[in-house]
Amino acid sequence: MFNTVYEWFWWDRIWLPVNLTWADLEDREDRVYAKASHLYVIVPYAFAFLLVRYLFERWVATPLAVSSGIRQRVHLKLEANPILERYYTTQSRNPAQDDIGGLSKKSSLSERQVERWFRRRRSQDRPGVLKKFREASWRFAFYLAAFIGGIVALYDKEWFYDTREVWTGFPKQSMLPSQYWYYILEMSFYGSLLFSITFDVKRKDFREQIIHHLATLVLLSFSWCANYIRIGTLVMLVHDASDVLLESAKLFNYAKREKACKVLFVLFAVVFMVTRLIIFPFWLIYCTWVYPIQHYPAFFGYYFFNVMLVVLLCLHVFWAYLILCMIRKFIFDITSSKSSLLEPVDSYFTPNLCTYFRLTQNHLYKSLLLFIHFMS
């Protein structure tokens, strides 16, 4: 049965155009092709990324945070209480009023003391700004390096300027060393995010993050095995462009540099709109939807890859809508308010960003927060 599933999964008609087989993609003297076996190195590389991240956060991000005035939060001392701790870890972090009464009797504490204990216990689990700063610093460093590396790897390639060249000779396109490392490092990075998600800052979109990282790895793996490497590198470059600005805006937000954070967020919004809503659909999806059938009949891999890109575009449209809502609110508050900039204003963007990032009771803010963390 296993052999049957294996043969069906790697059936030529799923991955390759008609009249082509895997034998056509065997390495020759002057040609090297991407193979599924190359992806095995992603697991050890992902763990290597975790080690590099640990060293980076300890020796680079932490001193940078301290120099920016960010300190480790000091928690109030919490008395050990096995009964309350067991309830906290196994049942609920926010006990109902009826449960508080029962816990009060079991622990020989007053109800007020039980409420105070749970409040302080939740505070201990709440990630501090220093931890968030270190994580954002690591992602910023990688996205910046990946974007610069992508530019270096692609600037002298014909398909970087003319997307028709993406399909010239497809799928018999020899893999370049720069393409190999660009793919492997990107996939290893997302693999490391998947491994570290349990001890990273746990956000409200925890499940969405797992789905996002898994989907990214699946799409990159498919494009690798089907030799969609040229278009894959272009897609990665387009996505890394805005992520750099998003993470840098977070860093300035954590450092309470309001003006710089606002400027970077606006720049992020502009770059996001240009790369995700203009370049991505009108250049890259057009390239994968129109040009391939000029060279060969459509096959399963053609439909699968394009459907996944369209789904990704739909997510971009949704996130762009949230960004525009924020920008509109920002512009409206600036033009309608004649008060001093130092005067508190009940809006999203005119007050300190640290303030409106904490306004979790507003559903629009929750959506934006989901967007920011999902994109990260």
Image (spheres, rainbow, N blue to C red):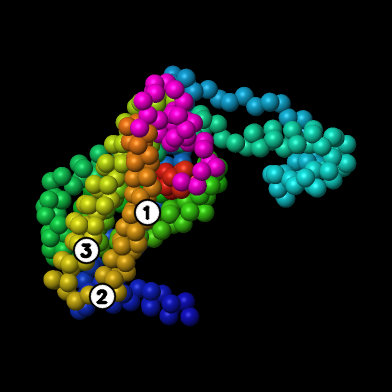
Q: Residues within 10 Å of mark 1 (few under 14, many from 20)?
A: few
Question: Which of 367/239 is in front?
Answer: 367
* Residue receiving disc 1: 318
How far apart are labels 1 and 3 at the CA level? Answer: 22 Å
N-terminal of the pair, mark 1 or mark 3, is 3
Q: Quadrant of the C terminus?
A: top left
Q: Is residue 63 visible?
A: no
Indicate whether residue 337 is drawn in magenta.
yes
Residue on which disc 2 sits = 299
**Labels 3 and 2 touching (C-beta < 8 A):** no
Front residue (pair 123, 172): 123
**Residue 41 spot, x, y in % from top left:** 39, 53
Residue 62 - label: none
Secondary structure under tag 3 reads helix
Q: Amino acid at mark 3?
A: Thr
Tell me the residue at 35%/32% (across/down).
Answer: 336
Instruction: Please provide percent x and percent y for residue 94.
Output: 70, 44
The numbered dot on residue 288 is 3
The segment highlighted magenta reads: 336-364
Q: Disc 3 versus disc 2: distance between alpha carbons?
A: 13 Å
- Along the horizontal axis of the image, is 369 left or right of 270? right
Mark found first going from the N terminus, 3 or 2: 3
Foreground pick, 367 / 340: 340
